[in-house]
Image: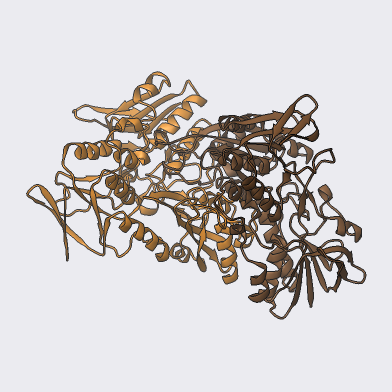
Chain colours: A orange, B brown
């Protein structure tokens, strides 16, 4: 059995390692276009925040470890350009050379990840206009910060990568403005909770400029000018963080079916429309456990889990994945922000009849020192009484609470049943009625 | 409709307030033997830790607020001695007087709570030998500490109240020894996790003396001697924290059925064996959601929730409670300790075929600053693959993670399904594979 993997990041290397452990004699070839494999991509903003740390701290396992200790044929600098499912061949060229390569496979995994969306506008290719997706991107940003007198940065986009980078840059005492064409910070977020985050950003001197369509970036002496329709911002560095695209072109060219957002469509076993070809990670779609429909939510846990499941299936141990709940958590300065499941808008779009509630509660018990405000927003379905989703914001106790919601969504639990759950209470950690229970009790009244 | 409630703490006052909100014209009489109602009992150790705080900070609502703003006929100092279900009468005497009282009822709630177990041994009635259950107890301890030169305390018992009080006393720079007859700190806890807590206690200079049967407490000049079979400890104050008894005597005398541990047996609507008489709070039993059997786990959330459910049922809105998962969390100095569901021993006793795993993981992502070790112990059932319980210990990220386990237990989720849940990940809060998922994956291999 010859197992070829395109892409050596989370999904690809998880699959390679697990398949090798399972079947040590299997021939496994990993083709990675960069020189970097197996690193903590999500850790990059926190590493960039600290000038004293090396970016290579984020490397979990080096290419040599995979090659020597795990006996995986890992080939970096290998850019796959073509997959031919008919003849079961992958081919491409070696980075920086004229040399081409071609490999046959019995099973193929496409784990090509995603890439930052860069608008097709003038000036987005200027030096100092950067994006953050790969480790190489991270190193470029860090080197830029370490070698240029960056006193002011502009972040285009207001998603979680942009917010994490705003925190990282402020930690380096760099002034930060954030700008985007759309009207809202985190558009999926209920407005009452988004306001809490806006206040936190303002308290940390981050300038917010939503609703400004960007026309171009221009070079102006030693600075960059971000020219919007009705406003111009200046910066020493620009970070483009408006989202990612799945790297699905080779799959599309190979005639494989695509899913939401142009991702590669896979079944529960991670097989594409060609059963010998798997896809996993940021390039592949998933089933949403709340809607039962296909979705594309590129996140790290799913990539690792899908990599494992591919390995199991390739090794003959059937593995089917339930799907994703869209659980995500991130930090914005001193706030924890978390979500799982559907927002009100997403619920409507999926055909539910959503009812929502937002409550303010406390992070610790009555009269316990250090207690702070936490916000819980819940979405339920009027027709069935089902819990559909949650968003939470607060300075503590949010990041792990969301896991309870995620489990409830996997269990397709009703709001009424969730409201009866025996959640933990002790004064340093919660009021007697956990904020999630208070929210569920309030939502029940509206359902 | 005349609704009489015996006991004005969590369950009793929750029931009274909710019934009054629901049916403002209902006649509600609350008979409370002490002068204190509606206070945060669980907050007492943290209040005692801080000499500068008033114990009354813990009072959530005063008796006068209930009387004046909520129009509840709240009678403190009323000690109920007899319930007569046949004639629907409660009677007793008023504290510190010869006066007796008697009230008829249409519906009765017994919410008499529990009391500290005090061994029937010589010297347990000496001044300076104290226990912590009621607000009055808390005030007595605090006054004792504020008015005596307490340099050394001995805590008899090693449960969570004892551990919380050890932390509180150490915060006041009081030397602490803990002693108990049984061999183990937290006997329900897996030994590998209990050792982590033992080390934390040792690091905080708490002396641990398990396996010492106590014979007596003796007065020795200005100190107290705790005389064990093979050892004598000295102290300026002794805290007896070996557990609580349900206050179920009046229910027993009234011929009502009792449940586990001598608690009052109730159905899902909180009715006792007499359908006009309800019981709720620390004096009443509950159904365990994992075993489906009766259990007695006196905790605050259940008391509040049961109080509400009684009010709803009394007001004609049928409320049935699913039951408890035995979720509990407490802090031991810098450690968070949490559990939900069954331990291996409890699972065996309940007729399951338990398989367990303990894993060590990290509280934050690879290379994220401040990451610490956290321990997860999971219990699964070999026959059905069901998740049965969890215990977790760690310096951060434990207290709220346990809620995910609690929800999974309510959903009767299998370990395999739990292992597929989409839990939150971001570098400041978790590794990519949440420690609970790592534990579930390991447990799956053994099932």
- Residue A292: image location, x then y, percent: 52, 55
Camera-side residue: B72 or B425?
B72
**Residue B299, above or below B163:** below
Camera-side residue: A116 or B118?
B118
Q: Residue at x 43, y 39 (%)?
A: A278
Camera-side residue: B390 or B301?
B301
Q: Residue furthest bottom?
A: B25
Q: In the figure, is residue A351 to the left or right of A93?
A: right
Q: Residue at x 45, y 55 (%)?
A: A394
- Residue A208: image location, x then y, percent: 27, 59
Q: Residue at x 48, y 21 (%)?
A: A24
Can residue B184 be seen here? no
Looking at the rendered image, the quarter that the C terminus of chain B falls into is: top right
Q: Residue furthest top?
A: A68
- Residue B67: image location, x then y, percent: 68, 74
Q: Quadrant of residue B329?
A: top right
Q: In the figure, is residue B322 to the left or right of A23?
A: right
Can residue A244 be seen here? yes
Looking at the rendered image, the quarter that the N terminus of chain B falls into is: bottom right
């Amino acid at each position: 059995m010859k197992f070829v993997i395109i892409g050596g990041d989370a999904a690809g290397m998880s699959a390679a390692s697990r398949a090798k452990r399972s079947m040590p004699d299997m021939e496994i070839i990993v083709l990675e276009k960069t020189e970097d494999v197996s690193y903590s991509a999500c850790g990059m903003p926190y590493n960039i925040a600290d000038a004293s740390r090396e970016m290579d701290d984020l490397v979990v396992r080096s290419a040599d470890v995979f090659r020597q200790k795990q006996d995986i044929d890992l080939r970096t600098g290998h850019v796959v350009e073509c997959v031919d499912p008919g003849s079961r061949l992958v081919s491409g060229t070696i980075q920086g050379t004229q040399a081409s390569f071609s490999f046959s496979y019995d099973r193929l995994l496409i784990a090509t990840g995603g890439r930052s969306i860069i608008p097709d506008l003038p000036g987005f290719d200027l030096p100092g206009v950067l994006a953050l997706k790969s480790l190489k991107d991270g190193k470029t940003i860090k080197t830029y910060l370490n070698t240029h007198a960056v006193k002011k940065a502009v972040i285009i986009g207001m998603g979680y990568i942009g917010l994490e980078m705003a925190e990282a840059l402020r930690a380096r005492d760099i002034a930060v403005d954030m700008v985007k064409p759309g009207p809202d910070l985190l558009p999926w977020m209920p407005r009452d909770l988004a306001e809490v985050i806006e206040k936190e950003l303002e308290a940390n001197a981050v300038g917010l400029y939503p609703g400004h369509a960007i026309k171009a970036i221009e070079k102006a002496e030693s600075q960059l000018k971000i020219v919007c329709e009705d406003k111009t911002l200046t910066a020493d560095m620009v970070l483009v963080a408006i989202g990612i695209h799945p790297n699905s072109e080779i799959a599309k060219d190979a005639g494989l079916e695509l899913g939401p957002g142009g991702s590669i469509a896979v079944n529960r076993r991670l097989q594409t429309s060609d059963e010998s070809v798997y896809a996993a990670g940021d390039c592949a779609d998933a089933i949403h456990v709340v809607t039962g429909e296909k979705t594309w939510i590129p996140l790290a846990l799913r990539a690792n889990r899908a990599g494992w499941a591919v390995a199991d299936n390739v090794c003959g141990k059937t593995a089917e994945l339930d799907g994703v709940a869209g659980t995500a958590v991130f930090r914005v300065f001193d706030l924890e922000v978390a979500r799982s499941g559907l927002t009100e808008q997403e619920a409507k779009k999926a055909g539910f009849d959503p009812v929502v509630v937002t409550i303010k509660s406390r992070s610790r018990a009555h009269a316990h020192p250090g207690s702070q405000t936490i916000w819980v927003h819940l979405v339920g379905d009027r027709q069935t009484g089902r819990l559909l989703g949650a968003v939470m914001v607060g300075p503590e106790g949010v990041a792990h609470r969301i896991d309870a919601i995620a489990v409830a969504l996997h269990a397709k639990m009703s709001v009424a049943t969730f409201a009866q759950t025996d959640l933990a209470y002790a004064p340093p950690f919660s009021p007697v009625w956990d904020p999630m229970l208070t929210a569920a009790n309030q939502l029940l009244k509206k359902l």
